[in-house]
Image (cartoon, rainbow, N blue to C red):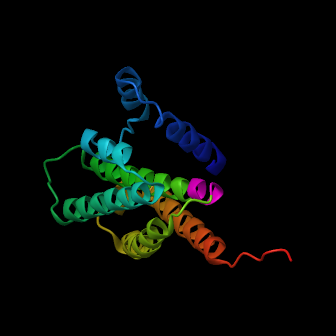
Amino acid sequence: MRSRRTLLALGVLSLFSMGSPRATRSLRAQTKKDYLSDTEADKIRDAATPSERIKLFVEFADDRIQKLKYTLAHPNTFDKNRGEELNGLINSYSGCVDDAADLVQLGHEKQQDIRAGIKSLKSKTQEFLTYLQALQKDGPELDSYKDTLDDAIEATQDAFDDATKAEKDISAPVRKKQ
């Protein structure tokens, strides 16, 4: 599963190098994630470095968590699609976290400077994980989004683990042969 996402991320990043207007329009249609707004997709596309992209995905994930908190705090008894809305927010959050983790792996493999992105991902995933685990224990309306929440917790833990591993590898001293 992780390697498939890595390949997808590689394909998307290779398309970023296309420069013609036609290619840009085609790229926009191909890379638009269903959980990103047009503005968010443009920000990702316009980010100059992988580290900036990672930080943007973390920012977008945080936005989804804030929307989830608001939605859960303001129940609407007349909303028949509330379960779908909650699941959509959680899935959207998971997509952002997964994409950030994929960019960490890709940046690590390409030996790019992604330290700032890793730092952002690690600190925020700890916050996210604390909130999601509390929600898992006694969240309102838990039955309507439990499975999606379990997946989000797993994705968050995986992202944290990936960032931790990459951080250790990046900060490890390189020994020169004598």
> From which residue to which does the magenta span run?
105-110
Using residue 18 as the reference point, say whether residue 68 is left or right of it: left
What residue occupies the far right of the structure in this picture?
178
Residue 2 coordinates in the image, percent (x, y):
62, 51
Q: Does the magenta run of residues contain 107?
A: yes
Residue at the spot 50% in from the left edge and 69% down from the top edge: 115
Residue 36 appears in the rendering: no
Residue 54 locus on image (x, y percent): 43, 58
Image height of 79 relative to 34, above or below = below
- Compared to 164, does 97 lie above or below? above
Residue 83 lies left or right of residue 3; in this view the side is left
Quadrant of residue 112 within the rendered picture: bottom right
Farthest top residue in view? 22
Which of the two residues, 175 or 7, is positioned nearer the viewer here? 175
Mostly what secondary structure, the magenta segment? helix
Looking at the picture, how far across and down is residue 134, in whole percent?
38, 75
Question: Is 99 left or right of 131, judged from the image as shown?
Answer: right
